Image: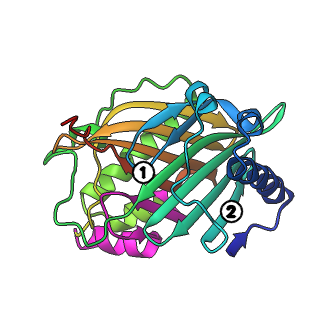
Amino acid sequence: MLTLLLASALAAATASADHAFLHAVAGGDSKAVAALLDNDFTWTNVDGRTLDAAHARQALPKPAIADESGAQSMQYGYGNVGVVEVNAGKLHTLRVWVKRPAGWRLLVYQEVKSLDAPATVTPGAGKNCENPCGAVPYQPKTATEREVMEAYKSLEEAAMGGKAKEWSEIAADEIALVSSNSDRVFDKPTRAAAIAKATLGGVAPTKLLSARLFEFGNAVVMTSQHQSDRGGLIQITRLWVKRDGRWQETLSYQTAVAAPRSSY
């Protein structure tokens, strides 16, 4: 396993909780898994189906990446938020851990399957991008939420407008953009280059339908549901970190919701 660890006790603590979670999942120990889930936990599988904590505890889903021993794994620590990103070919998993009074709890488990070939279409927000580049249907509850939502709208407006420099100022150096509408994982240089050339590789801003923001000091976890101009729904998780007085996005995992299968 190729692992990139930040040299901190936080990363070590997150790794310990994550290891316990994986061990419990592999062993089918639903009781041990349940104890590690946050009350606001969500599990989104590769088809975009999302379960809350109660349903996940009743029937534990099977991970898309059954064995992570040969996968690429990155771990990052942001105060009271820990992140684990796993890549195995076209399959990608995100786990977001948060520090609660009772210990580390898993807030987000999200899976993404990349396209097998380059995207032929790019689902987006429409020509004018009024939402999310302008007004969005979310009323911030705190000053922090207000700042994060402004950063989010600015990021999307920059991406839509081909403003690579402005986008790069809001994107963290370690940003990972993973989408089931694209055949690749974008890092900061490749995403900035794509924005500059207006070749977004299947990933573009989409209309925000709803969002939930979880504050942990200088880190904010944002989970949201979106709708593209082609009608498809998308589940997205973002992490925002405040650095030098400015909010930056460190990741964006986007899972398209698969159309219901026909019963006949």
Left or right of 251: which side holds 26?
A: right
Q: What residue is rendered at 22% in x and 68% in y?
A: 198
Q: Is residue 245 visible?
A: no
- The kind of residue tagged 2 is Gln
Q: Is residue 233 above or below residue 127?
A: above
What percent of the width, then of the height, locates residue 121? 17, 61
Quick one: SS at disc 2? strand
Give the numbered dot on residue 75: 2
Q: What residue is rendered at 68% in x and 60% in y?
A: 76
What percent of the width, then of the height, locates residue 138? 40, 26
Q: What residue is rendered at 54% in x and 33% in y?
A: 213
Labels 1 and 2: the sequence-earlier one: 1
Query: In this picture, which residue range is highlighted in magenta?
Result: 170-198
What percent of the width, then of the height, locates residue 85? 59, 61
Q: Is residue 73 above or below residue 206?
A: below
The stretch drawn in magenta includes residue 182: yes
Coloring basis for residues: rainbow
Which residue is labeled 1 in the image? Answer: 46
What percent of the width, then of the height, locates residue 169? 47, 61
Q: In which quadrant of the rendered image does the N terminus lie?
A: bottom right
Q: CA distance from mark 1 to mark 2?
A: 21 Å
Left or right of 78: which side holds 249?
A: left
